[in-house]
Image (cartoon, grey):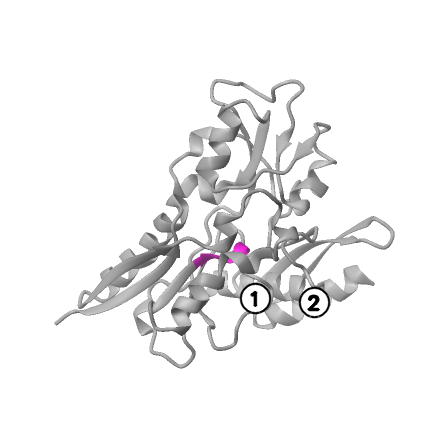
C-alpha cells in the first residue's frame, strides 16, 4: 500500500503551483509515495484592506499552516521562503528548500500598455522595494494587497500604472510575458529567500523523501540571508534586503539596511566560505548597522 504525504499550502494559484512542484519531486523520487494537497486560506490572505505591518507581519501567512502541521492534519507545509517570519517555531523546522528560481523583482505594466501610465501610481506594498525604487523611478507609490492574479487584475482595471512583483512568481505562473522591466539584483536587492521554496515538517520526523528536492546551494544562501535580517530584526515592513550568491565553496552576500533613526540607507557586501553562511550574515548585518 502506498504511503500518503499530505502537503499543506495556501490556497492561491501560485501557492498551489509551488506545492505541486514539491509533490512532483517527492513522487518521482519515491514512487511508493502518493501526495495530497491540502489548500487553506491564511489570515494574511483574508485581510487585504491594510498593509501587513499593521496586522502582524509575515507570520499571518504561516499561522494556519503551522497549526495544521502541529495538529497532524498535514505532514509537511510549503511556503515561499521570503514570506516566512525571521523567527520560526523550533518544533517546525525547515527541512528542505528548492533550487532558487530567478530572484529578481520586475516592473509590470497593464495589458496593452508599453510603459507606465501617466498620473497613475505604482502598486507596491513592500518598503524594501519602495526604498530602492526611489533611486530608479520618480512615480508615486501606493500599497496593493492580494495574490499575484488579484494584483494584476487591479492593474489591468486601471487602478495602477504598474506593479512591482517577484519575477519568480510570474515565471511559476507562466506569466513571463507580463514583465515590462526586470531589475538587476544590483538595482534592487531582493528580499531574503526570494525565489526559494521552503518545506516545513514536525521536528524529528523522517523527511528523506525530500532528499532529491533539497538544494544545498539554496540552503546556504537562505541561511546567510535570513541570519542577516534576523540580526537586524527585519520584519515584513522593514526596509531590509539580502541576496546571497553561492559559487563553489564561496558565498557572496549583498545587504541593505535602512536606519530609521536618521533615515540613512546602508548597502554592503561580504564574501567568504559557504560553510560560514550564518556567520557572514551576522557580520554584514553588524557592519551595516554600525
- Near-viewer residue (256 or 81): 81
- Asked if disc 1 and disc 2 are in contact, CB closer than 8 Å, the reply is no
> What residue do we see at 35% from left, 48% from top?
17
Asked which quadrant contains residue 69, the reply is: bottom left
- Percent x, y for residue 255? 69, 55
* Prevalent SS, magenta region: helix
Stretch in magenta: 79-83
- Percent x, y for residue 77? 39, 63
The residue identified by callout 1 is 223
The residue identified by callout 2 is 231
- Percent x, y for residue 231? 70, 67
Q: Secondary structure at mark 2?
A: helix
Note whether 259 is above or below 276 in the view shown: above
Q: Is residue 201 left or right of residue 251?
A: left
Tell me the number on the disc at residue 118.
Answer: none
Query: Which quarter of the rendered picture does the N terminus lie within?
Result: bottom left
Q: Is residue 152 left or right of residue 4?
A: right
- Near-viewer residue (139 or 211): 139
> What residue do we see at 66% from left, 67% from top?
280
Q: CA distance from mark 1 to mark 2?
A: 12 Å
> What residue do we see at 39% from left, 64% from top?
214
Residue with the most extreme left position: 1
Amino acid at each position: 500500500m502506498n504511503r500518503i504525504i499530505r502537503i499543506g499550502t495556501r490556497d492561491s494559484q501560485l501557492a498551489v503551483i509551488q506545492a505541486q512542484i514539491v509533490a512532483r519531486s517527492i513522487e518521482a523520487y519515491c514512487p511508493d509515495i502518493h501526495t495530497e494537497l491540502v489548500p487553506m486560506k491564511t489570515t494574511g490572505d483574508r485581510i487585504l484592506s491594510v498593509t501587513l505591518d499593521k496586522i502582524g507581519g509575515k507570520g499571518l501567512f504561516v499561522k494556519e499552516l503551522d497549526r495544521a502541521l502541529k495538529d497532524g492534519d498535514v505532514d509537511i507545509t510549503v511556503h515561499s521562503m521570503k514570506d516566512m517570519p525571521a523567527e520560526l517555531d523550533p518544533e517546525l523546522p525547515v527541512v528542505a528548500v528548492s533550487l532558487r528560481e530567478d530572484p529578481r523583482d520586475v516592473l509590470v505594466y497593464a495589458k496593452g500598455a508599453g510603459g507606465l501610465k501617466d498620473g497613475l501610481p505604482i502598486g507596491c506594498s513592500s518598503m524594501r522595494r519602495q526604498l530602492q525604487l526611489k533611486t530608479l523611478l520618480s512615480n508615486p507609490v501606493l500599497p496593493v494587497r492580494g495574490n499575484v492574479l488579484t494584483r494584476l487584475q487591479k492593474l489591468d482595471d486601471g487602478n495602477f500604472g504598474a506593479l512591482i512583483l517577484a519575477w519568480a512568481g510570474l515565471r511559476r505562473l507562466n506569466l513571463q510575458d507580463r514583465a515590462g522591466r526586470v531589475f538587476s539584483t544590483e538595482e534592487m536587492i531582493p528580499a531574503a529567500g526570494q525565489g526559494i521554496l521552503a518545506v516545513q515538517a514536525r521536528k524529528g520526523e523522517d523527511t528523506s523523501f525530500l532528499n532529491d528536492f533539497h538544494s544545498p546551494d539554496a540552503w546556504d544562501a537562505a541561511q546567510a540571508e535570513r541570519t542577516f535580517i534576523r540580526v537586524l530584526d527585519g520584519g515584513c515592513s522593514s526596509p531590509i534586503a539580502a541576496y546571497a550568491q553561492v559559487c563553489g565553496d564561496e558565498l557572496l552576500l549583498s545587504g541593505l539596511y535602512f536606519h530609521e533613526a536618521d533615515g540613512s540607507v546602508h548597502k554592503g557586501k561580504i564574501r567568504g566560505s559557504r560553510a560560514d553562511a550564518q556567520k557572514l550574515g551576522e557580520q554584514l548585518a553588524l557592519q551595516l548597522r554600525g
